[in-house]
Amino acid sequence: MRIILRSVKWLLGLVVLAVAALAAWLYVAPPELIRVGSGYSAKIICSNVFLAGRDANEVLAVDVQAPGHPLLRLMKVSVDKEKGTVSAGLFGVLGKSVAVVRDGLGCTSVPDGNTVAAKALVAAALPPAPPLDALWPEGDKVDASQNPEIAKVLDDPAWTGTGMRAVVVVKNGRIVAERYSDGFSEMTPLLGWSMTKTVNAAIIGTLVKDGKMAMTNQGLFGPWKADGRAAISLADMMAMSSGLEFNEDYGDVADVTRMLYLEPDMAGFAESKPLTGDVGKVFSYSSGTAVMLSRLWQDAIGDKDKALAWPRTALFDPLGMQSAVLETDEQGTYVGSSYLYATARDWARFGQFLLQGGVWNGKEILPAGFVDWMRSQAPASKVYGKGQLWIEGPGDEESPGAGVAAGLPKDIYWMEGHDGQTVAIVPSEQLVVVRLGLTPAKLGYRPQTMVAALVKALH
């Protein structure tokens, strides 16, 4: 009996040692998957707490854990509103990551943990213009349509989709209808995810107009000039046909998740990728490309402070997008792939701006013809435009012409973002439809059906 007891104690001791060793290893050298999960949790909660004013526990449960990787259900989060930080980790302690909020720049992940240096970067304070007592888009007053057919569409979850948070319908330059789900309103800034790419492209357009950038530019980064990457033009990058390696799979630790949550210098990480395809001939959708585009336009401005202020001074303020906050990485490069927060009405302002060809209140903000160029078919794709826009809607990326076959106007084009973010622009109908929410692709929601129904209702 003593021998058995000793054996049991010995085995228990081994188990305790093994568990302690595993815990120590996870603490000292956590796997990248855990760090990606904690980085994602901290960043999303930081932005939603400090920009959108939402409850941290709700964001953790609804936005992070419910639709995400099972590992995220084990994440615990701590918010320090006085310091403007959010930390997250597995069980609260393993693979910890931190995100910080910065004046004028929203939140950023801090992969190297140097929150003091990260907090030191701020954008120049620009006082918001007073709200005008005028109809949208000049002001924020809305004269909603009484058309029962429009109400029928927007009040039906089958049209607006599971997880809808905001829908705004603009016809002939005015908001005619809008809907918000519980907990959200016309004042809530919402994340556009990859719709940010289109805004980033428009920012480049402002610099093309100023003569600081040209689509024919090549040899874009110093290290590229010594190899085949020297042939990559700005136009190739805008059309997602650089030929560079980049894995855009969000399901695991891939290039895109590594860039967003493990790299303090996102553009530097993307810039280091080698060529794997023929420049200009292979379409490869890449968030890394969009962040490199941010670095290029910021470098084209030259002055760091002026570059940090540029999105607001050159685009957001002229359009009246007072809620818009474009976030940077830890080192100050705008995350032009993913991280623009704005109210649904401000996303609609940007859609209307594209509908008007880059002109606002009679002022040409983008070069003449630039928006038409953005939405013209990219040489290497039948469904993507030359300037960070989609010609086909969500789910139709592999099906050229699917939108027209479904009854949508031929000239429709789209801004698209992760988890069901879309802005549909239909010039022939003078129509813009914004749809924001939390709707994972696996649910199969197609905003095309809602837009088609609205086109019919508005006739």
Image (tube, helix red, strand yellow):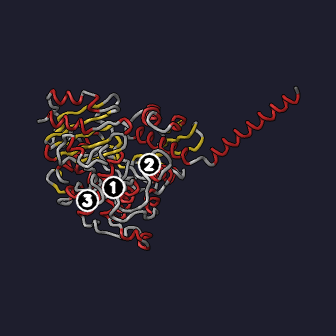
**Near-viewer residue (388 or 207):** 388
**Residue depicted at 17% across the width and 57% down the height:** 364
State the quadrant of the N terminus. top right
Q: What amino acid is labelled 3 in the image?
A: Thr
**SS assignment at label 1:** helix
Instruction: Please tell me the numbered disc located at residue 270.
Output: none
Residue 178 locus on image (x, y percent):
23, 33
**SS assignment at label 3:** helix
Left of 109 or right of it: where is 321?
Answer: left
Instruction: Please tell me the numbered disc located at residue 249.
Output: 2
Reply above or below: 203 against 81: below
The mark that comes first in sequence, 1 or 3, is 3
**Near-viewer residue (397 or 17):** 397
Instruction: Please tell me the numbered disc located at residue 309.
Output: 1
The mark that comes first in sequence, 2 or 1, is 2
Residue 345 locus on image (x, y percent):
25, 40
Q: What amino acid is labelled 2 in the image?
A: Asp
Label count reads: 3
**Residue depicted at 24% across the width and 44% down the height:** 402
| Disc 1 residue crowd, few under 14, some 14–19, many 20+, Cα 10 Å | some
Left of 46 or right of it: where is 148?
Answer: left
Q: For mark 3, what is the residue? A: 206
**Residue depicted at 31% across the width and 29% down the height:** 181
Measure how far apart labels 1 and 3 are at the Cα level: 13 Å
Q: Nearer the viewer, mark 1 or mark 3?
A: 3
Residue 64 locus on image (x, y percent):
45, 37
Measure how far apart labels 2 and 1 are at the Cα level: 32 Å
Q: Residue extending furthest right?
A: 2
Q: What amino acid is labelled 1 in the image?
A: Ala
Q: Quadrant of residue 285?
A: bottom left
The mark that comes first in sequence, 3 or 2, is 3
**SS assignment at label 2:** loop
